[in-house]
Amino acid sequence: METRKKVVEVKDLRINFKTYAGLVQAVRGVNFELYEGETLAIVGESGSGKSVTSNALMKLIPQPPGIYASGEILFDGKDLVKLTEKQMTKIRGNDIAMIFQDPMTSLNPTMKVGRQITEVILQHRSMPKAEAKQKAIQLIDQVGIPFPEKRYNQYPHEFSGGMRQRIVIAIALAADPKLLIADEPTTALDVTIQAQILELMKEIQKTSKTSIIFITHDLGVVANVADRVAVMYAGQIVEYGTVNDIFYNPKHPYTWGLLGSMPDLDNDAEELLHTIPGSPPDLTHPPKGDAFAARNEFAMAIDYEQEPPMFQVSDTHFAKTWLLHPDAPDVAIPEIVAKRIRTFAEKEAQYND
């Protein structure tokens, strides 16, 4: 049996920010691991800590105001937290690459896209310029852009939003990274282009051994892309499991809320408006107990007093909720979530047929 190679292991990561309002505890004890050729989706509302976590992996947290308060980020046997900026410069773009949300902020508008890809290749790989150019043209083709030789000599403004995002992905792939971090890569795109970019990400995972961390606020985009899912809330991972664990057997009330608030065009308009009540807590003063308690209709007295541990549901599935304690009352999954699960099952059955 082949042993999977671990690419990244994050242990008890805590990131704080000094602000005029006080110390913001943006990431509070995050743990996860990622294996070669695997995609992990990190899902949660704005402010849940997903982007801070992904930026921490690249050592892109400005210090100050950011503080790596504790924890390890183990990559290729090195703890990235302990590396100097000079050491990290060799890793960024080479071993770990990032795709950002807005392609226009990632591309130089005054430079032809082919040159932008070629420069990344030459920076990280020792090869003649002509060879680097050929590799750049291959990458443009690989990310699904027709007439790559012609496109090589065009500027970003000559591309559509979806095409620009494909160029950003080509740049990220230029040095054959071991880890690709995609931070909300489809948010600025329309639904049809979103689907194409997601399909491209799946293709990248299949054809290379690149591991992917996919950051999103939308659980809907996760189902067909990820192998595993980490649900984040208030700077913590509150549920962690395979895609099937999260979509067919969710255990945390916050995950129920995310699933229930996904639009379902097969149901009536009233269900489309389902939202999680309230808003995330102020992390300058994280609440005592379970951070989700104030928004959780199933909250018990202990939720306001004591932070729940991470309970193990199965070998692959974990959730941070007191509802999993042996003494907790049985709580039925909300009907709207049960409907979503039935819809997932029906769609999967149709897809498999």
Image (cartoon, rainbow, N blue to C red):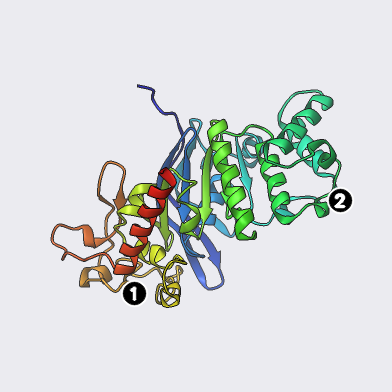
User: Of the residues shown, which amino acid type is indicated by label 1?
Assistant: Ala
Which dot marks residue 294? 1
Q: Is residue 188 left or right of residue 57?
A: right
Q: State which quadrant residue 129 falls in.
A: top right
Which dot marks residue 110? 2
> Residue at horizontal 35%, vertical 21%?
1
Mark 1 crowdedness (10 Å alpha carbons): few <14, some 14-19, many ≥20? some
Placement of 95 over or under 31, stated as above or below: above
Mark yes or no: residue 239 visible. Answer: no
Mark 2 crowdedness (10 Å alpha carbons): few <14, some 14-19, many ≥20? few
Where is residue 5 shown, x and y percent of the image? 44, 29
Q: State which quadrant residue 292 falls in.
A: bottom left
Is label 2 in a helix, a strand or a loop? loop
> Residue at horizontal 41%, vertical 49%?
350
**Which quarter of the figure is the C terminus placed in?**
top left
> Residue at horizontal 49%, vertical 66%?
23
Q: Is residue 159 left or right of residue 231?
A: right
Where is residue 343 shown, x and y percent of the image? 38, 59
Placement of 274 over or under 26, stated as above or below: below
Distance of label 2 from label 1 (alpha carbons): 49 Å
User: Of the residues shown, which amino acid type is indicated by label 2?
Assistant: Thr
User: Given the current orientation, which residue lies at the most extreme front position?
Assistant: 353
Where is residue 75 shown, x and y percent of the image? 50, 35
